[in-house]
Image: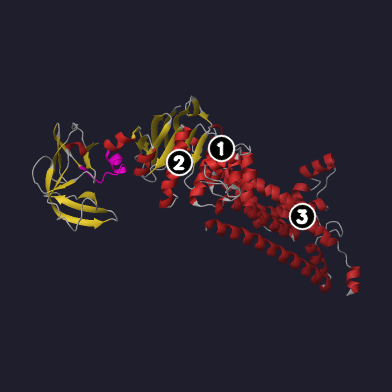
Amino acid sequence: MTEFFQNLDWSPLIISLKTGAISAVICFFLGLFAAAKIMKAGPRTKAVFDGIFTLPMVIPPTAAGFFLLLLFSRKRPLGMFLFENFNISVVQTWLGCVIAASVIAFPLMYQNARAAFEQIDSDIILAARTLGLSERKIFWKIVVPIARPGLLSGAILTFARALGEYGATSMLAGNIAGKTGTISQKIAMVMQDGDYKLAGFWTIVVIIIALAIIVAVNLLLGKSRNQKRNQKR
Amino acid sequence: MKLYVDIRKKTGDFNLDVTFECGSGTHAILGASGCGKSMTLKCIAGIETPDEGVIILNNKVLYDSKKKINLPPQKRSTGYMFQDYALFPNMTVRKNIEIAAKGNTVEKSYFSRFHLDGLEELYPYQLSGGQKQRTAMARMLAASPEMIMLDEPFSALDSHLKWKLEKEVKQTLEELNTITLFVSHDRDEVYRLCDTVGAMENGKLKEMKRVKEFFENPGSRVAALLSGCKNIAKARRISKNRVFVPDWNIELETKKEVPDDIGYVGIRAHYLKATDEIKGKNTFIIEDIEISEDPFEWNISFRCAGGTQYLQWKVSKEIWSLERMSLPKAFKISPENILILR
């Protein structure tokens, strides 16, 4: 047992947590922005963009990974441009982990934010406009605070999804130990070697993190539900 | 101070067509629910856009479809109190008011003025209906609007609170002396609070009348209904001061001249008088009496001999006691109490 832990390489946990956290932050703002924009769009624009924003959730992650690989490959315009001008490469790097995880997890944040915004009584926004409040002030001082429970649970779920991302990450970032080797990739790799012990260990780690996240979301939503019940009384 | 509104808007089968003009004072838009009252207010506030027309407030053009002017609600300075008050649920009473006052600190006296002392740090869900309304009023006025609009301000309140709040609102409006539009379906509220009133019928509003005049001479059948007239029937002109009402099978003498295009006559349920003398002007023998009881009033419906439609008579229990008096044989209506309607 002690030998197992002495020889254990913790880097997959660090890489996964880092990827999850950074992706959650990126998705939080992008999702917030996308949901806010789509609330103001006309019905047709809404239908099209809602489809695009939700797409990464419904297509196979490997398909998304393939698309990202085409986009960021150093042999293609965007990848070439990034590398030549900013010395940034996405393929086979940690940045690739973040981009793949963000793309796959983004719809979760977007959907949660949109649902939270849609629940807000539109009269409240209209009243704010007649009171002379700017759209920016209405968004940050009224819309976001009211939608907070939904936004937070969206962010947490995004973190969870990004943390466990496998398909797109393996396509775009590969599995380079200590660099892009996430927990999910580690599990898949050691299973190929028949190392049940190591795979089992990492599976337990993932389950503990996921469970903690779901409990956190439930507590958060339960709290806001209680508040709503008080409001009705 | 002047508000000029001349707008049209089509949504589905519904056609909004509103024209009126008013100065300072309280002006009611009276109408059944879904007739376009709130839509009119929303167009003035800029949270709905008409298809065409003009809205001018104190020489400032808020909307003009020909000149392509359509100010956003933020630039219109029109206060709007929503039916369910639309307070910001994430802010205390103080924050709700301060954000409308452009973030300025609000003096203690301002809270006292709206009877909000001690409630400053409470959230909307902790307030009663009346307290919510006071907060909404205080918040609206903190933004110093050039006119205000009240959308059914008392409909979300329990009836025992209504009186108290109504008195407060009346006093606030008198102190403000600004242009107030008051949307309601309650004729009594309108009579007590407003200076002029316009009846809205299927999205159409064409003029505002002094309140007293509106109740004395509503003009159209729908306006008469909105003003609370219970007895309305088709009428035919006989001569300058006489009409025939087929559904009631009676001929009535009127004080007002009967126009050629008269459509209906109306008789308010309180203006009928019971009599046992079957003689004189506008006196009719009745049959088929039915009586229902309200807490303080009798509702009596009857037909005139030969008529098909029932008339309604309302009388206070203090005046007419069922125990002591026998049922009347006839009814009388004085010629000045007959409403002539289009």
Dividing the picture into quadrants, the one containing residue B19 is top left
Cα–Cα gap, marks 2 and 3:
53 Å
Disc 2 to disc 3: CB gap under 8 Å: no
Judging by the rendered image, the residue that carries numbered circle 3 is A21
The range drawn in magenta is B220-233
Q: Dot 3: within a 10 Å radius of its alpha carbon, few (fewer than 14), some, or many (20 or more) residues? A: many
Discs 2, 3: same chain: no
The residue that disc 2 covers is B169
Side (left or right) of B101 relative to B83: right
Foreground: B120 or B95?
B120
Q: Position of residue A181 (x, y in %)?
A: 83, 60
Residue contact between numbered discs 2 and 1, judged by CB atoms under 8 Å: no
> How much space separates mark 2 and mark 1, taking CA atoms?
15 Å
Q: Which mark is residue B142?
A: 1
Give the secondary structure at mark 3: helix
x then y, percent, for residue B283: 12, 44
Number of numbered labels in the structure image:
3
Q: Quadrant of residue B259?
A: top left
Q: Which amino acid lies under the numbered mark 3 shown in the image of this protein?
A: Ala
* Identity, as a three-letter code, of the amino acid under mark 1: Ala
